[in-house]
């Protein structure tokens, strides 16, 4: 049965604005914690879930872990002249699609009759006592009706109540992926290639990612660390697909593969501090700075934030305290992005050192902000300090490294397979 749209003046314990990764995850965590008698989840369908998916690392104990249809336990990393495959234990790498996340949310919130997921566009928020009024445009045959509801808490994933963490981000990941189907078994479904730097590095530090969905099918995706003053998305992005096909031709024994779909997009890498929650309006998701600036991953942070908000509310505490300050992670992300921007050759070498001199669980614990101080020190001492210092000096003096061509394939010549 379709949930009833909100009525004018209706009161809720919480309104969740946006039902993407963060809104749906939070709804699941709140429902699972048994919190809230009336919760409204509203999405304007501007970013449909059908074509979306999220990958993340976890130890298998997360609320949404079992809903992921892809789970791999080994990760491969490679570059010109080096490669490494490692077991991830105790972590595994999972991918959940938008429809899977949607179905799991409906299952979890289905146990709480006061939770309603509706279509509508949230337009404005206004403080009212300890709570908040929310204006929502609800679609109707022939137009939309504006409804004003009130809520004790508003969880905002679209930036209505606060400015976004960094609206004019100059750094972003530009990616282009092909879903391919091969005539024979070529992939190991238990192993994903997280980063393979054997791809053209002319436009910026770039890597290829391969996520098998079966022995014959995979997503092969190329990502460039892009900076708006040096990267021309029209020009460089247009060559993405050629580079993906070059990679498949050179490194995947794919035969006469078929392209069954494409994933193309950008992920802004927000570098500033997250906005401070104001009263009853709590930012969540990308708006709350949950996307890590050095990697573009945000789903695992979103899960931790959602669980922490649910725990705060269940204990009667203010949910603003659920988001950690992350000064250390931000400083590291900033330093790494500076190296990637100033000297992409050094950046690729840095990634090679990181991956070849540290066990995968240590790297993942570090990326997941779960590493002990000792483990963080152990990881940091494996990294060369030179690139960080040089990048800092270059940033301060406005000079750039020459960025000679990074060797990206054993032969460095690749042929285009027939399309
Ligand atoms: C292309 C892309 C791929 C990514 N892949 C990964 C990944 O694989 N792994 C990972 O860890 N991180 C990934 N990220 C980073 C991060 O996890 C995602 O950006 C994540 O979707 C952020 O969640 P969110 O809820 O903040 O935003 P979204 O998931 O975008 O959700 C926002 C929702 O708000 C709705 N909306 C917008 N305006 C309104 C309005 N006025 N009223 C009501 N609803 C509205 C939209 O329809 C949308 O559903 C990716 C980011 C991008 C951009």
Image (tube, rainbow, N blue to C red):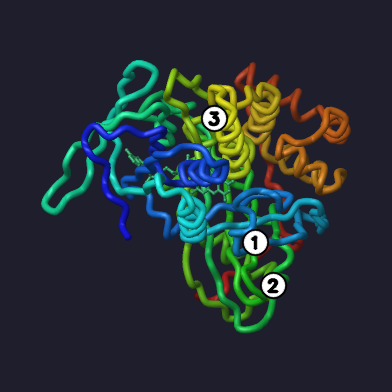
Disc 2 crowd, CA 10 A, few/some/many (<14, 14-19, 20+): many
Residue 87 image offset from top left, x and y in percent? 82, 57
Q: Residue 333 carries which label?
A: none
Relative height, residue 369 to residue 316 (above, below): below
Mark earlier in primary sequence (3, 2): 2
Element assignment for label 2: loop
Task: For the N terminus, give its image quadrant.
Answer: bottom left
Residue sitting at x 76%, y 23%: 389
Disc 1 crowd, CA 10 A, few/some/many (<14, 14-19, 20+): many
* Of residues 229 and 117, the one drawn nearer to the viewer in this rendering: 117
Element assignment for label 3: helix
Pointer 1 residue: 210
Residue 201 image offset from top left, x and y in percent? 63, 48
Pointer 3 residue: 313
Q: Which mark is residue 187?
A: 2
Q: Say if residue 239 shows up in the picture.
A: no
Calculate the distance from the C-alpha at mark 3 to the C-alpha at mark 2.
Answer: 45 Å
- Asked if disc 1 and disc 2 are in contact, CB closer than 8 Å, the reply is yes
Which quadrant would residue 291 be assigned to in this image?
A: top right
Mark earlier in primary sequence (1, 2): 2
Element assignment for label 1: strand
Calculate the distance from the C-alpha at mark 1 to the C-alpha at mark 2.
Answer: 9 Å
- Asked if disc 3 and disc 2 are in contact, CB closer than 8 Å, the reply is no
Residue 43 image offset from top left, x and y in percent? 35, 45
Residue sitting at x 28%, y 41%: 121
* Of residues 75 and 49, the one drawn nearer to the viewer in this rendering: 49
Relative height, residue 281 to residue 63 (above, below): above
Q: Say if residue 72 shows up in the picture.
A: yes
Residue sitting at x 56%, y 77%: 257
* Of residues 35 and 396, the one drawn nearer to the viewer in this rendering: 35
Residue 97 image offset from top left, x and y in percent? 52, 59
Residue sitting at x 70%, y 24%: 328
């Amino acid at each position: 049965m379709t949930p009833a749209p909100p009525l004018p003046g209706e009161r809720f314990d919480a309104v969740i604005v946006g039902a993407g990764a963060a809104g749906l995850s939070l709804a699941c965590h709140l429902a699972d914690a048994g919190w809230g008698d009336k919760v409204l989840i509203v999405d304007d369908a501007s970013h449909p879930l059908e074509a979306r998916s999220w990958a993340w690392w976890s130890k298998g104990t997360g609320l949404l872990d079992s809903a992921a249809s892809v789970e791999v336990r080994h990760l491969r990393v490679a570059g010109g002249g080096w490669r490494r495959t490692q077991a991830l234990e105790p972590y595994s790498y999972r991918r959940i699609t938008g429809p899977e996340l949607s179905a799991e949310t409906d299952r979890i919130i289905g146990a709480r009759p006061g939770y309603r997921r509706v279509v509508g566009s949230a337009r404005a928020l206004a403080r009212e006592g300890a709570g908040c009024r929310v204006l929502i445009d609800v679609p109707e045959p022939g137009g939309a009706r504006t409804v004003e509801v009130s809520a004790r808490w508003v969880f905002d994933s679209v930036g209505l109540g606060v400015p976004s963490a960094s609206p004019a981000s100059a750094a972003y990941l530009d990616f282009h992926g092909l879903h391919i189907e091969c005539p024979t078994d070529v992939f190991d479904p238990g192993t994903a290639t997280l980063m393979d730097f054997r791809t053209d590095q002319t436009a910026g530090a770039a890597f290829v990612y391969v996520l098998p969905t079966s022995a014959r099918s995979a997503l092969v995706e190329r990502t460039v660390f892009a900076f708006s003053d040096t990267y021309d998305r029209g020009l460089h992005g247009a060559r993405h697909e050629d580079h993906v096909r070059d990679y498949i031709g050179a490194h995947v024994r794919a035969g006469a593969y078929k392209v069954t779909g494409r994933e193309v997009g950008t992920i802004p890498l927000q570098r500033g501090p997250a906005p401070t929650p104001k009263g009853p309006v709590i930012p969540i998701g990308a708006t709350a700075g949950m996307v890590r600036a050095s990697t573009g991953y945000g789903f695992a942070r979103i899960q931790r934030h959602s669980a922490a908000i649910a725990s705060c509310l269940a204990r009667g505490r203010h949910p603003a305290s659920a988001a950690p300050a992350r000064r250390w992670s931000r400083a590291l992300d900033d330093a790494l992005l500076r190296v990637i921007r100033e000297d992409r050759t050094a950046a690729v070498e840095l990634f090679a050192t990181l991956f070849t001199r540290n066990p995968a669980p240590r790297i993942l614990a570090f990326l997941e902000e779960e590493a002990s101080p000792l483990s963080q020190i152990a990881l940091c001492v494996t990294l060369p300090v030179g690139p960080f210092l040089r990048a800092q000096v270059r940033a301060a003096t406005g000079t750039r490294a020459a960025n000679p061509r990074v060797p990206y394939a054993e032969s460095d010549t690749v042929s285009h397979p027939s399309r």
